[in-house]
Amino acid sequence: MLIKFEGNLCRILDLQHITPGNKRGHVQCRMRDLRSGRLLDNKFRAEDDVERATLDEHEMQFLYRDGDQYYFMNTETFEQVHLGTDVLGDSALYLLPDSVINVEFFEGEPVGIHLPATVDLKVSDTVPGIKGATASAQVKPATLETGLVVNVPAFIETGDTIRVNTETGEYLGRV
């Protein structure tokens, strides 16, 4: 969620509703200022007004990565924009070249991406499974083509394509 806080655009990272004994409840928020990148902690009471930022979404194609910058092209106007790893965070680990995603804009400036619920990625490296050890559900780490490391069942091998949940980063199944 993005809000305007003290004139700055902030993304909510953590939110807790706290109701102490006989006092009024409040919401404790940890947020990141998108322009400066600094972390902020604030306590919002019931009488505080919070303005939610409205975002525009444009369908864009991920083109390539150059160092810490990720380049996207608008599929309608062919205009290119770039986002840094500081803006994308862990979302960058789910991006494959030529994939089409929605990029979020605030006042004409790109501020983030909206990933699909799942992505299909190829396993680039994993340890071989232990034969005959099927009494318990074994998991092993697997490195995917984007650099993401996911715990997978023992039967997954290098070269397999798996489906990964983009919200939790968990293995969902083999494709």
Image (tube, rainbow, N blue to C red):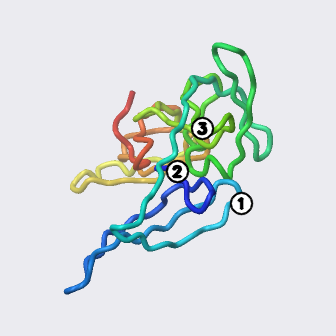
The image shows residue 102 at horizontal and vertical percentages of 54, 29
Q: In the drawing, does residue 14 fall left or right of residue 36?
A: left
Q: Label 2's element?
A: strand
Q: Which residue is mark 2?
A: 149
Count of labels shown?
A: 3
| Earlier sequence position, callout 2 versus callout 1 | 1
What is the number of the mark on residue 36?
1
Left or right of 134, for residue 120:
right
Q: Amino acid at mark 3?
A: Glu
Asked if the residue at tag 2 contacts the one at tag 3, i.e. Cβ–Cβ closer than 8 Å, the answer is no
User: How many other residues sit within 10 Å of disc 1, few (<14), some (14-19) or many (≥20)?
Assistant: few
Q: What residue is shown at x 37% (from left), y 71% (from top)? A: 45
Lateral position of residue 161 relative to residue 61, left or right: left
Instruction: Give the alpha-carbon distance from disc 1 to disc 3, as whole Å.
Output: 31 Å
Image point 48% across, 60% down: which residue? 13
Quadrant containing the C terminus is top left
Alpha-carbon span between mark 2 and mark 1: 29 Å
Q: What residue did someone put label 3 on?
A: 145
User: Closer to the N terminus: mark 1 or mark 3?
Assistant: 1
Mark 3 crowd level (few <14, some 14–19, many ≥20, 10 Å Cα): some
Q: Position of residue 4 (x, y in %)?
A: 55, 54
Seen in the picture, residue 36 relative to 143 is either above or below; the reply is: below
Residue farthest to the top, as pictured: 76
Asked whether the residues under the numbered discs 1 and 3 touch, taking CB atoms below 8 Å apart as contact, a structural biologist would say: no
Mark 2 vs 1: CB contact within 8 A = no
Q: Quadrant of residue 107?
A: top right
Q: Nearer the viewer, mark 2 or mark 1?
A: 1
Q: Secondary structure at mark 1?
A: loop
